[in-house]
Image (spheres, helix red, strand yellow):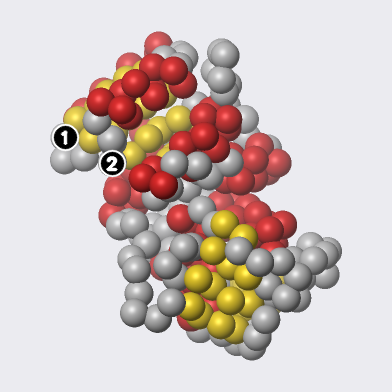
């Protein structure tokens, strides 16, 4: 059983998600605003936060970014649940620090699958080696930061770290979107949204590439997937 906090100003959504997760045996807490959510987290750090974007006073993007600034909440899994469905909206959610993004309306079966996958993922573990280096790309495995020839100590979210770690651990190997969903997000084969991977790749490139139109670190292998070349 996991402790899950749902943050949404729509009472109907809160009720629907609460019932679905409660049936799965989770301990579910509700909040109707970022302020309420902050109080819930202070009282009891949840195992997962499900967060709406469009809320009064402080929206979900700002609240997520705020949480990510705190050391103890850096690896807290956050799933955005939003009516905003465009690719740019998803990218903004992931860039704010979200681990996953599900659009409304949604299937309860899909919601439960996303929740199970996020809960299976443990926080990134500290490794014996303090860095992984591929060419000019250096990944700090203690601070979850990456440095390039052009920029030092770029902070990554937990999911960005896992994704880049996976790509750099096997340089010169192309990884398909579905392989990445399986290895990084731990979704069962054939499930998960490919746009999730594409959005995270886009975010990583925005952070590390000097020119995102001509990436030199994360390469697209057309018809296959993505690769970090040595």
- Which residue position holds label 2? 47
Residue 222 visible to the viewer: no
Residue 15 visible to the viewer: yes
Q: Position of residue 220 (x, y in %)?
A: 70, 72
Q: Secondary structure at mark 1?
A: loop
Q: Is residue 137 above or below residue 101?
A: below
181 or 140: which is nearer to us? Answer: 140
Q: Position of residue 146 (x, y in %)?
A: 58, 67
Q: Is residue 8 left or right of residue 206?
A: left
Q: Residue at x 66, y 66 (%)?
A: 152
Q: Secondary structure at mark 2?
A: loop
- Which residue position holds label 1? 25
Q: Residues within 10 Å of mark 2 (few under 14, many from 20)?
A: some
Q: Position of residue 33 (x, y in %)?
A: 45, 16
Q: Residue at x 31, y 23 (%)?
A: 40
72 or 93: which is nearer to us? Answer: 72
Distance between the alpha carbons at the discs numbered 2 and 1: 14 Å
Q: Quadrant of residue 88?
A: top right
Tag nearer the camera, 2 or 1:
2
């Amino acid at each position: 059983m996991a402790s899950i906090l749902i943050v949404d100003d729509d009472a109907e959504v809160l009720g629907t998600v609460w019932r679905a997760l409660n049936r799965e045996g989770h301990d579910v807490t509700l909040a109707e605003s970022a302020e309420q959510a902050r109080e819930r987290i202070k009282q009891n750090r949840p195992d997962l936060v499900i967060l709406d974007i469009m809320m009064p006073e402080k929206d979900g993007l700002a609240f997520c970014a705020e949480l990510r600034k705190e050391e103890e909440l850096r690896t807290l899994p956050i799933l955005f649940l939003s009516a905003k469905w465009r690719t740019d909206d998803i990218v903004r959610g992931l860039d704010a620090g979200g681990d996953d993004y599900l659009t409304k309306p949604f299937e309860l079966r899909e919601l439960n699958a996303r929740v199970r996958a996020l809960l299976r993922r443990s926080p990134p573990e500290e490794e014996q080696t303090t860095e992984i280096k591929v060419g000019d790309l250096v990944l700090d495995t203690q601070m979850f930061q990456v440095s390039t020839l052009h920029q030092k100590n770029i902070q990554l979210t937990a999911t960005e770290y896992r994704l880049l770690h996976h790509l750099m651990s096997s340089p010169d190997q192309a990884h398909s979107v579905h392989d990445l969903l399986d290895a990084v997000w731990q979704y069962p084969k054939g499930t998960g949204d490919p746009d999730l991977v594409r959005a995270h790749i886009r975010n990583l490139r925005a952070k590390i590439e000097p020119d995102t139109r001509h990436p030199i670190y994360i390469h697209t292998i057309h018809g296959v997937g993505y690769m970090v070349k040595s």
